[in-house]
Image (cartoon, rainbow, N blue to C red):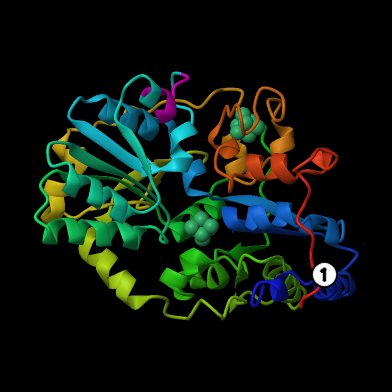
Amino acid sequence: MKYVDEYRDGARAAEIAEAIAREVRPDRSYAFMEFCGGHTHAISRYGIEDLLPANVRMIHGPGCPVCVLPVGRIDDAIRLARRPEVTLVTYGDLMRVPSSKGGSLLKAKAAGADIRMVYSSLDAVKIAEKEPDREVVFFAIGFETTTPPTAVALKIAMEKGLENFSIFCNHVLTPVAMRTILDTPAAPGEPPIAIEGFVGPAHVSTIIGMEPYREFAEQYRKPVVIAGFEPLDVMQAILMLIRQVNEQRAEVENQYIRAVTRAGNVTAQTLCEDVFELRDEFEWRGLGVVPKSALKLRDAFAFYDAEKRFAVETVAAADNPACECGPILRGQKKPADCRLFGTACTPETPMGACMVSSEGACAAHWTYGRFREHQKGAEKAPLRRAS
Ligand code: SF4
Ligand code: SF4
């Protein structure tokens, strides 16, 4: 496939792996966090860790929007969906995320709640237009990538004069999460998080550009290399990070120049600025309550704010105590450290959010993990020769 195979070329991957092995210093170790779930998925899918020297470690980050949504917000969505007048519209991945009492949106739907899956925010607007007697609530989640489409949906609903459309807004911000990880000391009994650099997210960076990462390089002395999602992108970013560490540099570099610019998508940024403002605080699964880390609709759009329209009051709820999603999202543990991993918890029977979304660390590890290689359908994707 033109422009894809080039980034999955096995011979080129071997060359980069050789360069990494040559440049890594044997007397030290390297630990890099891939913030984004898309990178976690690529690393597992293509077996990239197998191509790295033993002293280069990749740490999963909290960059899967499904994983970081706290249980209390899932409970809120279920309560909203149970209202007889409401049609709750959402992305498919959220359907199976466990709620606090062993429920999920899927179970609520089976019990009669009007919950519908869509592929885009505009589908939610279409449902509202077609069914004026229903209160259509769009359950909006995601990082800076999915925030502009939510803003577009709002603007279109306004243009159409739809009064039965609202947004349950759960959009969160990437740089604040990265800062929180660096600022938060390990809890008692948990291993410290030693991160020497970040593989910066791909889609998010197409929107926000490079500038928001500068504080990590300048204040925290942590290099950031923004990378695409193909295996060669990720390997090249790892090599660039190793070079920065070896040269005691801390800079924001852009491996993904085919999609990310320094300024990002200014039109999308302006639109989001118009529609959203910072929340004082927001709870993240794994990171706790983080100030100024999420967005809400500005007062000018209060009419479309489902939290105001339906007086949503989030009640904090705890994760399943056996689930290790929290430390995994903080980069302190790996999926296999969880005693439910692969036993009680599998993608078919998820006990925690990290096993639900395909970008979740546990799901990626389960699907492509070595221990499953003998099982049909779970083989890692091969790195190919470019045609
Ligand atoms: S939308 Fe893209 S950049 Fe954002 S978390 Fe998902 S995969 Fe990563
Ligand atoms: S294996 Fe399941 S229960 Fe354990 S951390 Fe992952 S999602 Fe949570």
Total marks placed: 1
Does 307 sit above or below residue 346? below
Residue type at the position of mark 1: Gly
Residue that carries the numbered disc 1 in the rendered image: 10
Please report the residue visible at 83 percent of the width from the left and 71 percent of the height from the top: 20
Residue 91 shows in the view: yes
Please report the residue visible at 88 percent of the width from the left and 73 percent of the height from the top: 18
Q: Quadrant of the N terminus?
A: bottom right
Residue 186 shows in the view: no
Q: Is residue 38 a member of the stretch shown in magenta?
A: no
Please report the residue visible at 12 percent of the width from the left and 62 percent of the height from the top: 159
Q: Is residue 104 a member of the stretch shown in magenta?
A: yes
Please tell me which residue lies in front, 205 or 119: 119
Please provide percent x and percent y for residue 196. Answer: 68, 62
The magenta segment: 102-108
Among the 4 quarters of the image, the one containing residue 373 = top right
Among the 4 quarters of the image, the one containing residue 29 = bottom right
Does 94 sit above or below residue 204? above
